[in-house]
Amino acid sequence: MGKIENRIFSSYERNPILYDEIYDKNGDIKNVYQKLFDLYGGHSIRDYVKLNTKAKSSFFNQGITFQVYDEKESQEKIFPFDLFPRIIDQDEWDVIERGAIQRSKALNLFLWDVYHDKKIIKDGVVPMELISSSANYLDQMIGIDPPGGIYNHISGTDVIKHNDGKYYVLEDNIRCPSGVSYVICNRTALKRALFGVFNHYRTYSVTNYAENLLDLLETTKPKGVDTPNCVVITPGMYNSAFYEHSYLAKTMGVELVEGRDLFVENDFVYMKTIGGPLKVDIIYRRIDDAFIDPLEFRPDSALGVPGLFAAYKKGNVTLANAPGTGVADDKAVYTYMPQIIKYYLDEEPILNNVHTYHCSRPDELKYVLEHIPELVIKPVDEAGGYGISIGNRLTKEEIETIKKQVKENPRKYVAQPIMSLSVHPTYIDDSESFEQRHVDLRTFTVLGKDKEFVLKGGLTRVALKKGNLIVNSSQGGGSKDTWVLKE
Amino acid sequence: MLARVANNLFWMGRYIERSEHIARYMNVNYFSSLDAPNARSQDRQFVLRSMLFMVGDPVHDDSTVLEEEKVLYKIGLNPEFPFSIINNVKYARENANSARDLISTELYESINKFYHFVLNYPVETFVKNGLYDFTVNVAEMTAILRGKIRGTLLHDSVYAIILMGVNIERATQIIRIINTKYNDALEAQGSYGDKFSNSFEWTTLLKCAESYDMMRRLYKKTPTSISTLEFLILNPNCPRSVMNSLNQVHKHIKQLDQSTKYNKNSTAFLVGKVRSEYEFKHIEEIEGNIQAFIDQILKSLTEISQKMDKEFFNY
């Protein structure tokens, strides 16, 4: 135990079954956390109450909020932020970073293949149904070569640490992964509140995301363009992630546009400026596939740009991420990731996959139906933590309901063993103390033409409800600043 | 800059400026009337009517008895009333939100703080004893915003658009205030031998425009109709004068439209024309027919705004 009197952690309840990020098996503080532990212990809990209030109002005044629509009217809420940072040392990070790049590259090659020759299917590595039954497979993308050969420019890989101390990937998000602005805001907020602690650690900066993003996006510019004009397209200021869209546009120094600001003429895209039309070459889009072009996809979309897809087909504009990437972050595809990585890169997966049972396979469906209390049941095509059932939390009736749902539509579900997410000391408002809470980590990988970048850090999401395993912000999750240490 | 966003920034400037004028008008009229030298100017009904007239919601029926708390609430914090301060601030922030990537973090944070201040101001306190505190804070926060606009933005087209909005709105509001006080002075004349030309209302008018002290410094005399109007309309050195606003608008439109040759259909041409008209006017021309002047200048300002809309914001 720490040598000095540690007022903050004297009441910290440590459940020995759970993998605690800051304590080792013997209940001793891990080396990398020792300094932080001592520094935090030097404060009283009163100090944390004050610091916590300060950090909250800082987020509020900066308008770093998201809208919640569930209640009667929309409300502005801040994304809960925790004062105790998570530390990842260089060796651990190295695995995560190499693993994230490996997966992103493999997914990019997979996407190229499924929209061109479908070799992986012909070779029998993955079944045809994986694609033919996916709602996110776009026939319109067949045969199209995206500029620079990149589909998933931006990937958000969610990893967790299991109680065996190893990192596992929970899912790959390669449609419009969000959350990166919070990584940077969390760092800013922690610096404002507890700047002293940074003197004792050599931590990588996270503020270089936007510049790298723009650099890499520009490597995928359309042919014949010299200096590309890049924009970020948002559904609008009432979107829950609008803050992030405006943040990215601002820090990249590019325009933030809405669909109505753009138009297409002769298969080129233009934006309407005060000086007249200006050609747009690269669009970082934060609008889902279905809404980007009413002429090609959902005709009732008011968010998109008529003719955009035609311009894309001609190779006159880059869309990041490319339309149709959703087919590859499907939870059913996830289960084939080890094979996909092996097939395209001839490498062993660096990050582990959680074993997954496909309800579409009769023998596995049988196992799932018999073992629901030990499994997490997930719909394959939902994002944001919706529709997930955790077996050991269900009542008997609920188990029956789930069984029925799965039997009715087995393709829609996969099941995984209940992973034990690692826990991290987290300041809890109600009890005014630090308690164990489950965490995961979303990493951000950017692919460019022959170049890649992983943000050294990432969004550590915390499930604030005691015992809860779902960390998404829409489900009451918070986040922590995440430090990747140099050397 | 996107045309849509330019439009939003223009209106952000206008709403910020508008909220300040309304707040100051409420403050000055209410508090200076408390010990006004004549019964008419002291009359609560008179003051409340004046406030409603100024925000564009005049009470035409003389027999209507207004309730102070209701009127204050309506102009200050009623979210249902389109011209209320709270709505102006809401619109300002909404416009800032949509252009958040273009304005500085510092400016946005101040607008956001301003919004939360107004939004969370307790209605009970405001209508009972918070008028002074609320309006002074609104005026101060808008001053901070102007400081952040000047001090933290790149002085490019974004800046020019915002300041066009601020100055067109300022000229408009000053004219509206002049119009209201002109009417008040007309109404207040006669009682206790008060004459129109040296009515107490001229002093109030100057205070509403935060120009009283400086006007005294320049003229060293009790304000009269002619000296007040000259100062507030034609003096280019008075920061709140119509002339000064027109000069600013002219300066910023040239930042947007850098063509060396004038196009007679451009906003820049119209602004230049209006500006030179007032540059070479003398107060006697205006004083003879104040109402006609007021109508004319409001018309010109609307025309400028419409022209901008067509030239820059039309998308």
Image: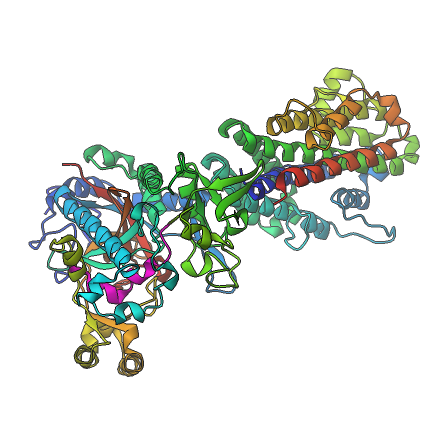
Q: Position of residue A471 (x, y in %)?
A: 29, 59
A444 in relation to A470, above or below:
above
Say whether residue A323 is magenta.
Answer: yes
Q: Nearer the viewer, residue A298 or B23?
A: A298
| Total marks placed | 0
Q: Position of residue B248 (x, y in %)?
A: 66, 26
Camera sees residue A220:
yes
Q: Nearer the viewer, residue A369 or B224?
A: A369
Is A43 left or right of B213, judged from the image as shown? left
Residue at the spot 32% in from the left edge and 64% down from the top edge: A385
Is B210 left or right of A11, judged from the image as shown? right
Q: Position of residue A190 (x, y in %)?
A: 31, 41
Residue B206: quadrant of the picture? top right
Which span is picked out in magenta?
A320-338
B211 in relation to A479, above or below:
above
Say whether residue B182 is magenta.
Answer: no
Q: Nearer the viewer, residue B211 or A361?
A: A361
Q: Nearer the viewer, residue A373 or A104?
A: A104
